[in-house]
Image (tube, grey):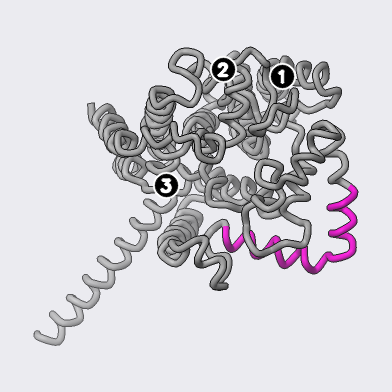
């Protein structure tokens, strides 16, 4: 009952935001970019029976720039309620809010497995009222909340997978494949979330080798599950675009757009075909595959000539990812007037997260390890490309858990100091 109340409260909070803003999404300004830019444009194409195509407002043919799961979901809503309509905005934002509210459950379950029910309850409610969780589900049309739900569920399952029957490993792999079709960046954590339960299974069986029958079979079943889910989309991409990519093909474009010498802004607006007419003309004239291929020698050449710039920019993006700070230049501050309040908020969260990790690691390294590895590994892709706050969302539930652990550690220290001071005063008074 308490969990249902938590989920219901989280959903109600998000729906208040949705009710206030959903009508604004049907504004045609900037080609309806409030419907998720590329996500909305691809969903429009699907709804118009043009297939998975045209990731920009102008029609441009088949694409694999985006993972398929969320655009197809949005396209179904467009077919039922109308393309770019207020009803479609209300529906997709409501679904986002449901996904985000349901994430309270794997947050609670994972924390209870790792720590205890009391901390788990605080973590679940922490997610329910977490500002980023509210904003990125109720105020943005993108895959953030769905990815957070799927990845956190996979994380929870991985913590207990060593106790499950072999067929559950197959389903785990399939669910992770679905998560990757929502956001391929999550694949970076698949080795972690597979090896940890395999290690636990190996210890549980006390096998002499990692290649014992149970361990090997379980790992293979998880691999089969993820391959079965990814294969149809991989075949589609090869048949349509003649490229071998399990999910999306835009790596070299993303890498070039963030490492081409411009460090004035962490976004890619100035080099994106959606906002740069020259790039749009080049994209349409070359076609997607050749356009992306043309960026590879450009970015490799630039980084080869300017390795110091790349290293400094990577470090700068890492700082931005965890603090929200990019620049104090007047131009950037005018573009991002809420940078400094955001730096205070994000910096405080990061500090509490680090305190939580340190305290947890000292007390129980085995249970802290999955959280530590996830926080270390997942952001690496974004350190070398785009480190915007949006791209933290898949691991934000884990961040919330660690922040709660950090708050608990700080509170415990404050109480300990208070008791020590009280004891000293009592002795002095005596």
Q: Which mark is residue 233?
A: 1
Q: Identify the main secondary structure in magenta.
A: helix
Which residue is pictured at 53% across the width and 51% down the height?
389
Q: Along the polypeptide, which appears first: circle 2 or circle 3?
A: 3
Which residue is pictured at 53% across the width and 46% down the height?
390
Q: Along the polypeptide, which appears first: circle 1 or circle 3?
A: 3
- SS for callout 3: helix
| Bounds of the magenta segment | 297-320
Q: Work out whether residue 206 can be spotted.
A: no
Q: Nearer the viewer, residue 213 or 355?
A: 355
- SS for callout 1: helix
Label 3 crowding class (10 Å Cα cut-off): few <14, some 14-19, many 20+? some
Q: Along the polypeptide, which appears first: circle 1 or circle 2?
A: 2
Q: What x and y, as percent, mark residue 210?
A: 73, 31
Query: Is the C-beta separation of discs 2 and 3 under 8 Å?
Result: no
Which residue is pictured at 51% across the width and 33% down the height?
35
Is 202 in the magenta? Answer: no
Q: What x and y, as percent, mark residue 203?
A: 61, 33
Question: In this rendering, would 187 be left or right of 260?
Answer: left
For the residues labelled 2 and 3, the Cα–Cα distance comes to 32 Å
The answer to which quarter of the image holds residue 317 is bottom right
Residue at which label 2 appears = 168
Q: Which mark is residue 132?
A: 3
Query: Is the C-beta separation of discs 1 and 3 under 8 Å?
Result: no
Q: What x and y, as percent, mark residue 310?
A: 77, 62
Q: What x and y, as percent, mark residue 252?
A: 79, 43
Q: Nearer the viewer, residue 366 or 182?
A: 182
For the residues labelled 1 and 3, the Cα–Cα distance comes to 31 Å
Label 1 crowding class (10 Å Cα cut-off): few <14, some 14-19, many 20+? some
Location of the C terminus (image quadrant): bottom left
Residue extending farthest to the left is 430
Query: Is the C-beta separation of discs 1 and 2 under 8 Å?
Result: no
């Amino acid at each position: 009952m308490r969990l249902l109340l938590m989920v219901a409260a989280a959903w109600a909070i998000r729906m208040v935001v949705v009710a206030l803003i959903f009508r604004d999404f049907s504004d045609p300004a900037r080609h309806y970019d409030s419907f998720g830019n590329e996500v909305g444009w691809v969903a429009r194409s699907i709804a118009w029976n043009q297939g998975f195509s045209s990731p920009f407002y102008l029609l441009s043919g088949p694409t694999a720039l985006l993972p398929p799961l969320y655009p197809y979901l949005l396209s179904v809503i467009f077919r039922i309620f109308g393309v770019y309509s207020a009803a479609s905005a209300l529906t997709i934002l409501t679904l986002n809010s449901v996904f985000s509210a349901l994430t309270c459950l794997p947050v609670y379950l994972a924390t209870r497995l790792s720590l205890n029910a009391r901390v788990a309850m605080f973590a679940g409610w922490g997610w329910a009222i977490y500002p980023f969780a509210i904003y990125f589900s109720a105020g943005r049309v993108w895959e953030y909340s769905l990815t957070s739900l799927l990845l956190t569920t996979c994380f929870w399952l991985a913590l207990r997978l060593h106790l499950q029957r072999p067929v559950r490993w197959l389903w785990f792999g399939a669910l992770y494949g679905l998560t990757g079709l929502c956001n391929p960046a999550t694949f970076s954590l698949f080795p972690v979330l597979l090896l940890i339960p395999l290690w636990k299974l190996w210890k549980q069986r006390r096998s002499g080798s990692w290649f014992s029958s149970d361990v090997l079979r379980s790992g293979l079943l998880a691999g089969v599950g993820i391959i079965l889910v990814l294969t149809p989309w991989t075949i589609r991409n090869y048949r349509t675009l003649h490229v071998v990519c399990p999910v999306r093909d835009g790596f070299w474009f993303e890498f070039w757009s963030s490492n081409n010498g411009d460090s004035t802004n962490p976004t890619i607006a100035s080099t994106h075909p959606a906002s740069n007419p020259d790039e749009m003309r080049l994209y349409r004239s070359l076609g997607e595959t050749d356009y992306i291929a043309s960026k590879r020698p450009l970015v490799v050449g630039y980084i080869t000539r300017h390795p110091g710039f790349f290293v400094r920019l990577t470090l700068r993006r890492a700082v931005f990812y965890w603090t929200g700070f990019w620049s104090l230049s007047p131009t950037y501050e005018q573009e991002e007037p809420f940078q400094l309040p955001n730096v205070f908020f994000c910096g405080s969260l990061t500090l509490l997260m680090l305190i939580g990790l340190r305290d947890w690691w000292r007390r129980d390294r085995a249970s802290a390890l999955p959280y530590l590895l996830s926080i270390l590994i997942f952001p690496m892709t974004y350190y070398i490309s785009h480190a915007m706050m949006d791209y933290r969302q898949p691991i934000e539930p884990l961040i919330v858990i660690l922040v709660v652990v950090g708050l608990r550690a700080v509170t415990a220290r404050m109480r300990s100091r208070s008791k020590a001071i009280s004891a000293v005063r009592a002795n002095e008074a005596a």
